């Protein structure tokens, strides 16, 4: 097949899969590519994360840490980090999102299981990953003013934006110490529904965790329950937050911190989707912005976000906000 990356056959041969069939999987929002590999009864997934745009080593490190703590990351069969190759366990086709599309009555149970995985993760000591510090939060939130605002032709108070986020997030920083491992992209498209494995680990497999940091336990809950790609009702969000409280007994400021991180993450995602359109020509992501914007507006109603909400009132015209940021479409 002419569209296969250079070196794929050599890597598979070195890994003992030289006779395997190779089936490319359509890509998404990164430089990574994935291939289904089949050699008789043996099945695997091949990830190509080529330097300099990608580095598979963080994925390998986080996968090893998760597996050591009885969380269900894919098993690694072979890897060549310098060339960007990773051969790993194939978790199949049952992504949580796709499964829920076909089985909507299973929504409560699937989300309860996903919340339980987070509660288990948060009982572990944090992994050896970088901190989710204020500079990182600011850099992410800054994608909104860097990409979305210019795309809308808006001249905004960038310095005031940074100051507003510092006022909102600074009170939370001490509460995220010593912290938990934050997978950062934990949502229905990155959760695979499986049967229990031979080690007795649960039915949900984890993928796309290579950007893990050590931060606040509310972050991955926001990612799950304010999903950019799938509608999660406010009732389900509230029920799953209550479920997490039962499992993990977070502190009294948890709800306020959840909204802080919800607004921060949603501002970041609006910026990322605008960047995917303007820089990478991936217009399909614009369709997700209204859902993300609507969740961000709800988060901004919390008093903990008063400074950020005031900045939006002063800088983002009402017609854009009433349209939930969707005028790019």
Image (cartoon, grey):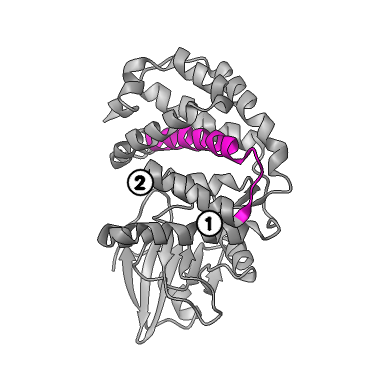
Q: How many marks?
A: 2
The residue tagged 1 is: 209
Queried whether the magenta region covers residue 91, the answer comes back as no
The residue lying toward the viewer, choosing from 196 and 248, is 248
**Vertical position of residue 263 compared to residue 233: above or below:** above
Is residue 207 visible to us here?
no
Crowd class of label 1 (few under 14; some 14 to 19; many from 20; radius 10 Å): many
Q: Quadrant of residue 327?
A: top left
- Which residues, given as a range, are shown in magenta? 248-275
Q: Is residue 192 above or below residue 276?
A: below
Q: What number is the disc on residue 221?
A: none
Quadrant where the N terminus sits is: bottom left
Q: Secondary structure at mark 1?
A: loop
Secondary structure that dominates the magenta span: helix
- Is residue 193 in sight in this rendering? yes
For the point 50% across and 44% down, the residue is 222
Toward which corner of the image does residue 150 lie, by quadrant? top left
Q: Which mark is residue 229?
A: 2
Q: Residue at x 59, y 21 (%)?
A: 164
Specify which label sits upstream in the sequence, 1 or 2. Answer: 1
**Please, is residue 293 above or below residue 182 in the view?**
above
Position of residue 79 in the picture relative to residue 313 (left or right): right
- For the residues bearing labels 1 and 2, Cβ distance under 8 angstroms: no
Residue lying at 39% horizontally and 55% vertically, measured from the top left: 189
Q: Label 1 to label 2, Cα distance in Å?
A: 17 Å
For this rendering, which residue is in front, 8 or 114? 114
Indicate which label's residue lies in the foreground, 1 or 2.
2
């Amino acid at each position: 097949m002419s569209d296969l990356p250079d070196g794929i056959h050599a890597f598979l041969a070195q890994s003992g899969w030289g006779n395997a069939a190779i089936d490319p999987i359509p890509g998404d929002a990164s430089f990574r590519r994935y291939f289904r590999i089949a050699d008789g009864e043996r099945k695997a997934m091949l990830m190509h994360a080529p330097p300099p745009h990608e580095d598979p080593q963080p994925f390998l490190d986080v996968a090893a840490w998760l597996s050591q703590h009885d969380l269900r990351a894919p098993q690694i069969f072979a890897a060549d980090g310098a060339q960007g190759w990773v051969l790993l366990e194939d978790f199949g086709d049952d992504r949580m999102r796709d499964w829920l599309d076909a089985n909507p009555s299973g929504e409560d149970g699937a989300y309860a299981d996903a919340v339980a995985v987070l509660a288990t993760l948060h009982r572990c000591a944090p992994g050896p990953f970088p901190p989710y510090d204020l500079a990182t939060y600011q850099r992410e939130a800054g994608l909104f003013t860097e990409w979305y605002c210019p795309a809308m032709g808006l001249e905004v108070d960038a310095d005031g934006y940074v100051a507003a986020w510092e006022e909102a997030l600074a009170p939370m920083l001490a509460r995220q110490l010593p912290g938990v491992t934050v997978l950062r992209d934990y949502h229905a498209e990155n959760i695979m529904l499986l049967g229990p494995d031979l080690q007795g680990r649960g039915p949900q497999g984890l993928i796309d965790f290579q950007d893990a940091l050590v931060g606040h336990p509310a972050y991955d809950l926001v990612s799950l329950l304010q999903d950019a790609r799938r509608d999660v009702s406010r009732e389900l969000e509230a029920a799953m937050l209550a479920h997490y409280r039962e499992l993990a007994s977070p502190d009294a400021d948890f709800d306020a911190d959840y909204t802080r991180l919800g607004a921060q993450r949603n501002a970041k995602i609006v910026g990322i989707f605008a960047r995917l359109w303007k820089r990478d020509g991936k217009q399909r992501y614009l369709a997700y912005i209204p859902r993300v914007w609507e969740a961000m507006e709800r988060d901004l109603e919390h008093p903990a976000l008063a400074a950020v909400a005031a900045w939006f009132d002063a800088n983002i015209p009402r017609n854009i906000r009433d349209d939930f940021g969707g005028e790019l479409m």
